[in-house]
Amino acid sequence: MALIVHKYGGTSMGSTERIRNVARRVAKWARAGHRMVVVPSAMSGETNRLLGLAKELQPAKVDARVLRELDTIASTGEQVSVGLLALALQAEGVDAISYTGWQVPVRTDSAYTKARITSIDDARVRADLDAGRVVIITGFQGVDDAGHLTTLGRGGSDTSAVAVAAALKADECLIYTDVDGVYTTDPRIVPEARRLHTVSFEEMLEMASLGSKVLQIRSVEFAGKYRVPLRVLSSFTDWDIPIDEEARSGTLITFEEDEKMEQAVVSGIAFNRDEAKVTVLGVPDKPGIAYQILGAVADANIDVDMIIQNVSHDGKTDFSFTVHRNDHARVMDLLKNKVVPALGAREVIGDSRICKVSIVGIGMKSHVGVAAKMFRTLSEEGINIQMISTSEIKTSVVIDEKYMELAVRALHRAFELDQEAAAA
Ligand code: ASP
Ligand code: MG
């Protein structure tokens, strides 16, 4: 019999009635003979509620001491969830026991509010599984070496589940959520968007980093590193559907290209409005420019995504890059007050009304002209491209945010993503 990890998101755990349904679903798998570990999120809205309370009382200056307490507060949401789910399973006649992160323990570094898992001790969990129990472990949290509680960043329960699955060498990790899988793009923008039966790990990684919110990106990285078989599926099907039907539903994340059954060149379109553009104008074109600008930005701990340097004329050039919108004001300040004067550049301008639209597909490795087709499609819609970046399996463009939906729809149509790709 298989060792299976189930992860349930906040919506699936949103009320006692829903928790009862989760318990029934888990009980069904346990009764079929599987060794079951369950990792739930806090009930939906709970983490926001807890952090909202914290905000009312916290000091203006947020230092490590404050962050430590935020983790102590936020981690309680998951503690309530595991206890409630254990009770619901016991009520179903299933022997179940819950653990918080520190009880397992799930060890992390000490980066409060965005800690990384360093190791998971599986001894206690294995002993319970051997005794025939369903083991329920909190998502989102862990403990550092000094015994302080930590959390893994918003959406971190996905990563908890995958890390637990890796530590236990589980046969599969099923991520139950409020959508029924990974789509070619967001169906709220393109109603013809289609669920993918399989998606490669590399594509999933790109999609997660480019703005698809289905899985926390660290969970995908973890799955790749430890080769954890991962499936995203809906928790809103009837709990009593046959297990073999359930086990084939949703989207499977695969590791071998040849295992990928759909051979579309482009598998999905991602987009986000999280970035802002910054342009330094009239920069003297000489060695060390990129270093002076981006070095200062890195020293301020600000992540840079896309970068463009134009050809120079009259010994001057323009230099543009994008950062997260939350960092926009900070980066503008830094450039205006420090970098521009030091460089002798003319001025800096910012634009936060941009969006990034990306096409993703491992088929791009072996096909030419894919990016060109993207550019043609956008030009036919009269959409101006401000920046471009590419990797082996994606092409991203920055455009005016008012064209985002138009661009996504046009690209979805151009790459025929509404149609099932031919089987390999
Ligand atoms: N409860 C946490 C959050 O809301 C973790 C999670 O749900 O994955 O971000
Ligand atoms: Mg989530």
Image (cartoon, grey):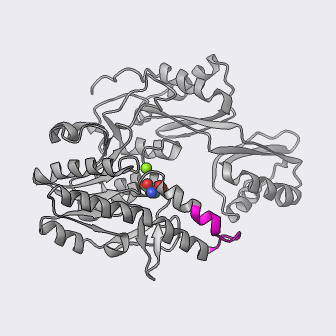
Q: Is residue 54 magenta?
A: yes
Task: For residue 393, say whether it is visible.
Answer: yes
User: Is 355 left, or right, of 205 in this rendering?
Assistant: right
Q: Is residue 128 covered in magenta? A: no
165 and 374: which is toward the camera: 165
Can the viewer see residue 400 in this picture? Answer: no
User: Going 85% across and 55% down the picture, which residue do you hit?
Assistant: 336
Which quadrant is home to the N terminus? bottom left
Q: Nearer the viewer, residue 179 or 301?
A: 179
195 w.r.t. 33: above or below:
above
Q: Nearer the viewer, residue 273 or 147?
A: 147
Q: Is residue 389 left or right of residue 314?
A: left
Q: Which quadrant of the render holds ligand 1? A: bottom left
For residue 82, side relative to residue 333 (left or right) = left
Is residue 87 rendered to the left or right of residue 289?
left
Where residue 158 appears, x then y in whole percent?
Answer: 39, 54
Question: Residue 277, relative to residue 67: is it above or below?
Answer: above
Quadrant in which the C terminus appears: top left
Residue lying furthest bottom in this view? Answer: 146
For the record, the magenta segment spans 53-63
Residue drawn at x 68%, y 37% as measured from the top left: 354
- Residue 135 percent coordinates (x, y): 23, 64
Going by the picture, which residue comes out furthest to the top? Answer: 380
Residue 41, placed above or below residue 260: below
Looking at the rendering, which quadrant does residue 75 occupy? bottom left
Q: Is residue 336 above or below residue 372?
A: below
The residue under the point 33% across, 75% down is 103
- Residue 217, percent from left and from top: 45, 51
Query: In the rendered picture of this protein, how many numbered marks are placed on residues?
Result: 0
- The picture places residue 53, in percent across and down from the top left corner, at 58, 63
